[in-house]
Amino acid sequence: MKKFLVRLTIFSVCNLGLFLVLVFSSSWLARKQNDFSIKQDTKFIILGHSHSECAYNDALIDNFENFSQSGESYFYSIPKLEQIIRMNPQVKTVFLECTNNQMTENVEEWIFGKKYLGYYYANYFPYIGLKSDFFIFRNQPTEYSRNFSIVCKDILKKCISKHKIPYEYGGFKGVKGTLYSYQKNSLKHSNEDFVQIKKGISEVQINFLREISNLLANKKIELILIRTPQHSSYQGFVNESEYKKVIETEFSKVKFIDLVNFPLSDTDYRDPEHLNTVGAEKISGWMNKFLKEDYSYAFQKQLHISFKDINDRKIFKK
Amino acid sequence: MLFNSLHFAFFLPLVFFGYWFLTKRNLKIQNILLLLASYYFYACWDWRFLFLLLFSTGLDFVTGLKIAGSKNKNHRNFWFWISIGVNLGFLGVFKYFDFFISSMALALNSINIEVHPLTLGLILPVGISFYTFHGLSYVIDIYQDKIEPEKNYIDYSLFVSFFPLLVAGPIERATHLLPQIKKNRIFDYSSAVDGLRQILWGLFKKVVIADNCAEIANQIFNNSTEYNGFTLAIGAVMFSIQIYGDFSGYSDIALGTARLFGIELLKNFSFPYFSRDIAEFWRRWHISLSSWFRDYLYIPLGGSKVGVWMKIRNTFVIFVVSGFWHGANWTFIFWGFLNALFILPSIIRNTNRSNMNIVAIERTFPNLKELGSMVLTFSLATFAWIFFRAESITHAFQFIQELFSPSLFQSPEIFPKVTLLLIVVFFTIEWMGRTGNYALQTIFSSRPFWWRWVLYIVLIFCVFFFTGKEQAFIYFQF
């Protein structure tokens, strides 16, 4: 029995050692292979989830790159942001989508959920630090362990082939369709994984948002939170009071643009949460003009501004 | 609790350490520990069905004692038929009731007698087909005076519920397993190492081969109308390999696990896809079930010691019943019928025992005749598996119609290169190790230990890196 246990222990330790060497060396190689460099004249980037992914067409906005990705929580925005700002010192301003559904508790499913772990964790593993690995493991040990093989496969693929950025790490995705057709075919869309908003706030997400704020402040990069337009029928407004409270108290010193009342018609929306290509063209056109102006004036009197404030030009009056 | 789950990865070492260290090698305590572990293992599936398992165990224990304790033939028959009736009754209700009612309704509706059947919609208790057959074989052996009844309830319960074989076999015999349960177990280093090696091979077969083949097979079978004949052929082959990897992988894990506790279970697979004819295939596939049907159904019906027509009848009976055992669907019954048809020529010509040895023994490669026979046997088995996998008879025939259409000569729409490479590696190892109880047992056995360690590490890495999308073990649904 002693011989069995000793040999089994030695074998297990050898295995574990080889495994860790393989995983971490592949991670290092993957980091080397994946280049987050963007065009030298890009000064503005936006990160967020599907709302900003569908809304801001970087082909229509000068010096702007969209790194948003559907289903992305702030937990994964952080390693991506770290890579982008490390490789691209020319980036001076980061827009970060900050909408009602990113505050609700349910959104933590995007961090710990089985489906998201299998994709996002695998995708971001080479860039996530040990502290973040442990954070996931502590919260979801079973799913973490179960998905680790997917992580390993993904790292191997990444370390042997070069991936264009943003590619798997986000980018503008124009969507077709209108609100009318969406509501008409509601059964067809019933399996779409939109976050069900409940009252209540996710402290986890807010902590990560704070982390992003501190990260950018340390690098002296401007952070502007932005709420992309949503249709008035959007169910997500159910936590509007809590959402506003968080923005006004926790992030009172961070710039915030609320575009929720941006003038769009029903035909500009693909569904209550997402703009279609027509809506994206309108908001992208506006964003292009906004960034071309010396928009810093917009924040001179107050850091939290709405579309109405900008449109009325009240805030531009010196 | 799946064998390839994290839960089991913690469960097994705990039970192992408790068994060899905490029980102080006391046989009684070891058996109690294994029994409690087995009930916990089963309860993890669905604790509600634990009561059914306990009831079935108690029933067979009592009826066994009653049968053996009585000299009166009527008395013995009474208790015998109580056991058979109740055991098969539970199986019938949980597994076949809805099927019978729906089939009857369909038949009546087809002759314009409208009926609206009331189905029970019961969940099938995991492993019911397996532990029911354990109990039945015990009672039948007592009735036939082949064994004495077990008087120790713990020992008998462990025979029925031993966790490695509880949910998907092998279907053990009292004559084989009970004596091991009653005997003091001594830790044997080679046996334990062999057990671990078999578990590793089983995991490789299930997680790397079966699960990866399953993804492709499911895609093709679930959308069979969208693919050409060649792609459907690939789908059929993938399913053949999936079911082999899945079931034999599970059996390997079960046998290897049992060996860690000093218990040898019955071998369940013996490289069936290297068979040279269908009769040999059925001697090598799900051996514990085939031998159960042979001993408790085929032989009592007269077996081979009857005229040709009775032999044919007996052959069809056991294959159709075997198909029916697998599930409540006409596809399984047709699958059994098809296999009976394939084996019939050899039964009639008395050539069903012509390939009893290992193919190409002491040779590296098979000759052309052997290779041709193996390919033909594999093709016949794969053809039958189409019915096993299809949703319905109609689906199976549609699949076959498209498979054997001119589109069979078109380029495949799905060509899984990595999976095919894994399959080639897998069958190479199986071929090299075909003289052992399982493939990995004899490979590198004459080389220094580090050769084997390198191979084990490569297999473990393959399990990790090539893990397919998690699929349930196929035979759990039976």
Image: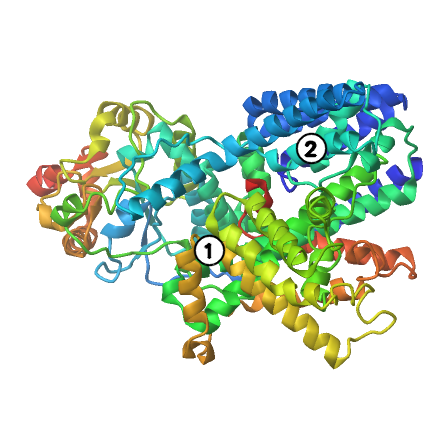
User: In the rendered view, would you say A315 is above or below B271?
Assistant: above
Q: Is residue A269 found left or right of B67 in the rendered image?
A: left
Q: Which mark is residue B390?
A: 1
Sort mark 1 into few (<14), some (14-19) or many (20+) by Cα contacts within 10 Å: some
Which residue is pictured at 44% across the width and 49% down the height? A80
Q: Quadrant of residue B255?
A: top right
- Which amino acid does the dot numbered 2 rest on? Leu
Which residue is pictured at 90% across the width and 45% down the height? B190
Say whether mark 1 and mark 2 are on the same chain: yes
Q: Secondary structure at mark 1?
A: loop
Residue B144's x, y, as percent? Answer: 79, 33
Question: Closest to the observer: B408 or B414?
Answer: B408
Which residue is pictured at 37% across the width and 34% down the height? A107
Question: Closest to the observer: B127 or B142?
Answer: B142
Residue B328's x, y, as percent? Answer: 49, 43
Q: Is residue A202 found left or right of A130 in the rendered image?
A: left
Q: Tags 2 and 1 in contact by the CB under 8 Å rule?
A: no
- Which amino acid does the dot numbered 1 rest on? Ala
Question: Closest to the observer: A148 or A127?
Answer: A148
Q: How many numbered markers are drawn?
A: 2
Q: Is residue B227 found left or right of B128 in the rendered image?
A: left
For the N terminus of chain B, give its image quadrant.
Answer: top right
Q: Is residue B27 visible?
A: yes
Q: CA distance from mark 2 to mark 1?
A: 30 Å
Chain designation of label 2: B
Chain designation of label 1: B
Q: Which mark is residue B136?
A: 2
For the C terminus of chain B, give its image quadrant.
Answer: top right
Which residue is pictured at 55% across the width and 41% down the height? B477
Residue B188's x, y, as percent? Answer: 92, 39
- Going from N to C along the chain, the mark reached first, 2 or 1, is 2
